[in-house]
Amino acid sequence: MIQTLIDFVRTLTDPERLIRLLSTVLSGWMGYAALFGIVYSETGLLVGFFLPGDSLLFTVGVVAGAGQLNILLINVTLMAAAMLGDSTGYLLGRKTGPRIFNRPDSRLFKREHVIRTRKFYERYGGKTIIYARFVPIVRTFAAFVAGVMEMPYLRFLPFSVCGGIGWVFLMTMLGYNLGGVPFVRRNFDKVILTIIFVSLLPTIIEVIKARRAPQPEKVPE
C-alpha cells in the first residue's frame, strides 16, 4: 500500500513517467480530470498533505512544454481545482467548527497539522490563504481553518482566488519555461528537491523563530 503510494507520487513528479501515464491510462480529458482531482484533493478533502503540490505543478508545466498538455487549458483547469478545493475546505470548516481540534489522530489526520495552520492563520490573517499556497501541509488546512474561525466567505474568496491563480500560474509556467533547459532536464530530481525545500522554507523559518522566542516565565503557584 505504502509502496504503491510512493510510486504514484514519483510518477507525478517525473516528466517521462507522467507523459507515459497521460498518453496511456489517462489519455485525453481523463488526464486533465485526474490532475484536477489531485489539486482539488490537496485543499478540499483535508487528506492531501502527502500530495506533491508544488513539484506536481512544476512537472505538469514541463509536460505541457513537451507538447503533451495544453498549457492554457491545464492552467484554467488547475486554477479552478485550487479555488474549488479552497471553498470546499472552507465549508467543511464552517460545518465542523472547533470540534476538529479535539478529534483524535488517525493515519490520515494529524491534529498538529491543523493547530500549526491555525497559528499560521492567527499570525497572517486573511493573507494566510495566499501564503499557504506555497507552504506544504499548511496549504491543505488553511481554507478549512478559515472556515472554523468563521471568516466571512466574501472576505475569504478574494484571497482564495488570488492564491489559487498565482500558485498554479507561477509553478506551471516555471516548469513550462525551464523544462527544456538541458541543465534542468539533467538534474530534474535536484530541481524538484529545491522546489520542495523553497516551499518548506517559510515553515522552517517560523519554527526557528518560535524556538528562539523567549518563553514566558511560569508564575509560581
Image: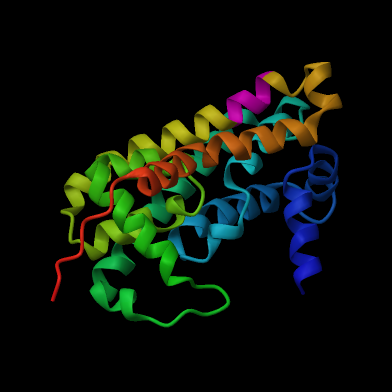
Identify the residue at image location x=44%, y=60%. 44
**131 sits left or right of 127 in the view:** right
Q: Give the range drawn in magenta.
A: 172-177
**103 sits left or right of 9 in the view:** left
* Above or below 169: residue 118: below
Between 67 and 96, the residue placed more toward the observer is: 96
| Residue 214 part of the magenta-drawn span | no
Quarter of the rendering occupied by the C terminus? bottom left
**Total marks in image:** 0
* Above or below 63: residue 91: below
Residue 48, position as x, y percentages in the image: 54, 60
Query: Overall secondary structure of the magenta stretch?
Result: helix
Camera sees residue 49: yes
* Above or below 102: residue 55: above
| Residue 176 part of the magenta-drawn span | yes
* Above or below 30: residue 202: above
Residue 157, position as x, y percentages in the image: 26, 45
Quarter of the rendering occupied by the N terminus? bottom right
The outermost residue toward the front is: 220
**113 sits left or right of 161 in the view:** right
The outermost residue toward the bottom is: 104
**38 sits left or right of 150 in the view:** right
How was this image coloured? rainbow
Residue 15, position as x, y percentages in the image: 79, 38
Identify the residue at image location x=77%, y=51%. 10
